Amino acid sequence: MTASLTLVLLMAVLFGAGISIMLERSLTRVLIGFLLVGNAVNILIYLMSGTPGLAPLLDDGVDHDAISDPLPQAFILTAIVINLGITAFMLALIYRSWWLAQLGTKGDEVDDLEDDIEDAEEAADLIRSSAADDAAIQEIIDASDEEPADLDEELELEASARDRGEEGRR
Amino acid sequence: MTAALVPLVVLLPLLGAATSLILGRSRRAQMAVSTTVLTAVAAIAIVLLVSVDGGEPLAVAVGGWEAPFGIVLVVDRLAAIMLIISAIVLLVVLVYAVGQGVADRHRETPVSIFHPSYLILSAGVFNAFIAGDLFNLYVGFEIFLSASYVLLTLGGTGERIRAGVTYIIVSLVSSLFFLSAIALIYGATGTVNIAQLSVRIAELPASVQLMLHLLLLIAFGIKAAVFPLSFWLPDSYPTAPAPVTAVFAGLLTKVGVYAIIRTETVIFAENDLTVLLMIVGGLTMLIGILGALTQADIKRLLSFTLVSHIGYMIFGIGVGTQLGIAATIYYVVHHIAVQTTLFLTTGLIERFGGATSINRLAGLLKASPLLAILFFIPALNLGGIPPFSGFIGKVGLFLAGAEGADADAAGPAWLIWAVIGAGAITSLITLYALTRFWNMAFWRRREELEGYESVLLGSVQEAPEGATVTATRTTPVLMVAATTALVVLTILLTVFAGPLFDLTTRAAENLIDPDVYVSLVFPGGTG
């Protein structure tokens, strides 16, 4: 069995870096460390397939000894999928713990119901304001359709009127 | 014919999980699906045990790819016994959880994601028991661990997230150990099929065997919570909802123990680490139970006794004779049932008394005599009082140890006697810790609670987050019924101890000779 020195070195670096990052306190770093070590283990599995060869597709006229060992590749695929799922869960967990850290003990009491109401109100506000914007835009377009030449003048007039009003308030 | 049933024990829970996810809106439909699935698996497991005990070999090559290239699912007596007891316990705890969920819709109790996660957890546990190759065992572990992450952080409160983070990171590290061990074992032998490994590992140089053996043991030791790899358990289990803690305590550590049994008897049958297992087993017992002594919170106390009693099983595996393995299997079955029961009862106490701390509970005997009985029987059982199954299991283990010491087969005799002594002391301290809790919580009158002082309570420490719950006097019938059913099951383990011990002896007979397992997977030899 022969192995690639580059891969061995890469594996060693990933293991070392991953483990030292995993020892940090921050959860995000622990996750990054876990990802690095997970990839290091995948490379370790790959190294165990021995001498690299042709793609493991058995066809007529392909020498059985010339292909790479397909089994470790199947292991790695499975491990990658598992790591992906766990990473997604960890990210959700990290977000949740960040959220709780922001709110302190209040975080436990925030109810979904309140969130829903808040969300609904925000959405309603958004719809109202965008409807107002639409109306304003429509007005300007209508105005420009009627008297394209006077539009600039009108706007200027409006602006000066606003300035005056502000000065008056001061 | 029955061989066709083998994949169903994993498939059914997975399909059930998918169905109950679709039915997420309707609680009743979810409950119907999950109870049906677990009942079906329990029935299948019984059929499998009967046929495997009748001598029918049950090794299924999934997808028609023959071993060693394909994935084999193997059911021998040990796997069938584990399937039955875990299916029954999972079913009963599910009924308990349903009872709890119907009664109150508090944020911390099971939500719609509970049923799918629970079924996936079951699928993972069952898959680990019937896995015929190491990589499939790893996949089984990952399935139930992923589900357990979700169940442990259910509701996402601050306390659970904190406990969950410890648990998840420790589990991830142990998974990485396991995966590295698989990689190295594959590199050394060119296979991950357990039966083929049994033959090929014996041909490796002793030092390589030792390294691979230790790597696997570390991975499984973390999962089984064996000292010194047990620190994470008492911190993470107690915060989960009562039914979740019960299942974790009862089953998840035992999957680790199951994997250690397989490692010692089949994979590394030639390379023995008896002395190491003995020492680790003895220390696990003593240190675990000393931790339990100082806990005021019953959930934490039970978590420490859980760690300590894993030590008995490790001791039995270390002895390694037929009697030793038979007693270990019996003890595993007993411990799954009794530890789950105790955690379920704790859930009831928490509901009824409004607290789990020994300093805040009193007068429960008068308030609920039934609850007192439901706690008292498993407590005596765990403490090893005759005639309960805990006593029978411990006597079996000690007898096996004594025989081993006489025959000088399993390590130095003084070590075995020392561990037996540690086991006896542990059993007494367990009894002390649990009856102290019973005396204070049940026997002490409610009026005495204010300003109560006693030497018994001098050394106990409150949990860092002693949570109080509002006491509810209405306890759902389903919760009490489920707990009672498990208490009856633990008593049945005593009543049918004879036939059951015969069965575990036959299971052990197959285990101490790895060739039996090999010929099960390769009827025509490994080639």
Image (cartoon, rainbow, N blue to C red):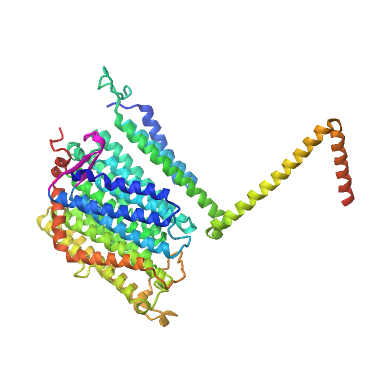
- Residue B13 place in picture, x, y as percent: 32, 49
Whether B64 is among the magenta residues is: yes
Q: Decide which of B32, A130 is in the foreground and name it.
A: B32
Q: Is residue B458 left or right of residue B373?
A: right
Q: Is residue B274 visible?
A: no
- Residue B355 place in picture, x, y as percent: 43, 70
Quarter of the figure that contains the C terminus of chain B: top left
- Residue B322 place in picture, x, y as percent: 13, 53
Q: Residue furthest left?
A: B407
Q: Give residue B347's quadrant in the image.
A: bottom left
Q: Residue furthest bottom?
A: B447
Quarter of the figure that contains the N terminus of chain B: top left
Look at the image and give the residue range highlighted in magenta.
Answer: B55-75
Q: Residue at x 40, y 52 (%)?
A: B167
Q: Give residue A43's quadrant in the image.
A: top left
Whether B356 is among the magenta residues is: no
Give the answer, above or below, for where B103 lies relative to B21: below
